[in-house]
Image (cartoon, rainbow, N blue to C red):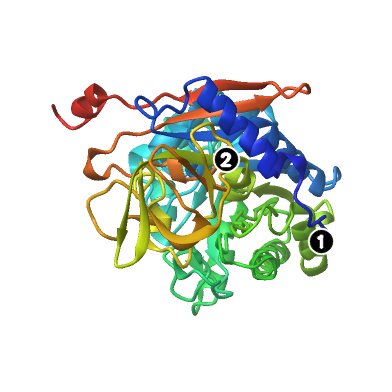
Amino acid sequence: MTDPRPTALQSPERRESILRAAVREGLLDPEDALLAGFLDLDAVAATVGSLHRAFPDSVDVLHAFAAKANSLVPVLAELRGLGMGCEVAGPGELAQALAAGFDPERIVFDSPAKTRRELRRALDLGVAVNIDSWQELARIDELLAGRADTADQAANGAPEPRSRIGVRINPQVGGGSIAAMSTATASSKFGIALADEGNAERLVEAFRARPWLTWLHCHVGSQGCPPDLMAEGVAAAAGLARRINGELGRRQVVGLDIGGGLPVDFHSDLAGPGYDEYVERLRARVPALFSGRFRLVTEFGRSVLAKSGFTAAYVEYTKTSGGRAIAITSAGVQVATRTVFAPESWPLRISAHDATGAEKRGEPVVQDIAGPACFAGDLVARARALPLLEPGDIVVLLDTGAYYATTPFAYNGLLEPAVHGVRVASDGTVRFGPLRRAQTVEELLARTGG
């Protein structure tokens, strides 16, 4: 079982030391750098190490980071250096993964809407492809047939693809507590619905007719989906793999992509369910995963980075309205989109600091933490008890290393903030490196046709 205690890499003291160093170095400044994201790369390395250790050495597994969680090229390069692969869901993420130096065979392409051009490029590169629908399977057939460049090849079928190709199934095992994050419901838009009439039989025949179909993929969901539900979905995929191999009389399905989605604890410094705990659930529910029969791919994203990052913003103004204290900050919907639009599902912890970055002391006062966008709902925290904030103070949005500042929302033309990588030496010295520089007004104008 995972040790439930927070590690030193997740401690408030470490975050405060990073914040104070950022203020001293001008990475946070009330005039020129009102908002910035920070990613603790030491903590990232520790988390990735725990992921690698959770799966036994006897299992051939590729841990492919879900690029949607943080697609900054230097972050992807850091993860590549830590031994991870990369899961992408579109041409932009594929380009970012390649720019980060991932070998194509360590990239997995998932998307329910892959175009012919995108599929052709993935097949040309040798990127792994997970087919999402019957129509996409037919499109792959056409593309592979088009590669038969001689009459002899055309007569004998399409050439074997360089890519490893699988089919994503929807195991239809149900949803978690956040409907939008649950991808294995009865009517999910993702994958081929396994329990729908005739689909299991049709999948067996699809594999029989296509020796190059060698993988199965499933992903039950992410935040809000408990590990037991995730394991249930993996069990359905493993069961289908055994059925296909049994009915075909050959070991055709050689690998299972079991997705990611391990939930994160956004209420404390605890990480949430650990990778080792999840592996124990898999051992109990799907022992075939550890028998050596299948190669594995995982696609964890949020759980790899969320706890290692924070977003810091200055308080610009404060006011009282209807008896409620309100702090207006530079951090709002543009860096905390899900929290603003779905606060019940995506609550964030907030810490309060003075202008030096030191933790702010004082009697807790119930107050709203508002962002700069021009709509009333742009709040990152509602009725939160914190020391009373004042102009020039700093608020920190915790657990935002995945999504958030690295996936900005261009509302009101609000500029993308800088994101900084952080390492802390054994003597406590804090060192920063750029992961993304702050967007300029000129760059915004160029992007918007100015």
Q: Residue furthest front?
A: 363
Tell me if mark 1 has few (under 14), some (14-19) or many (20+) residues whose alpha carbon lies within 10 angstroms of its own.
some
Residue wearing tag 1: 280
Tell me the SS state at disc 2.
strand
- Name the spot of residue 292 as percent of width and height, x first: 83, 51
Residue 102 appears in the figure: no
Type of amino acid at the residue the image marks with label 2: Gly
- Choose mark 1 or mark 2, whichever is in front: 2
Q: Which quarter of the figure has residue 272?
A: bottom right
User: Which image quarter is the N terminus in?
Assistant: bottom right
Tell me the SS state at disc 1.
helix
Between 173 and 224, the one nearer to me in the picture: 224
Residue 418 appears in the figure: yes
- Name the spot of residue 113 as percent of width and height, x first: 37, 51
- Name the spot of residue 376 as percent of width and height, x first: 26, 59
Q: CA distance from mark 1 to mark 2?
A: 27 Å
Q: Earlier in the sequence, mark 1 or mark 2?
A: 1
Q: Residue furthest left?
A: 450
Residue wearing tag 2: 309
Q: Residue furthest bottom?
A: 197
Residue pictured at 69% horizontal, 21% vertical: 429
Where 168 falls versus 300 (above or below)? below
Type of amino acid at the residue the image marks with label 1: Glu
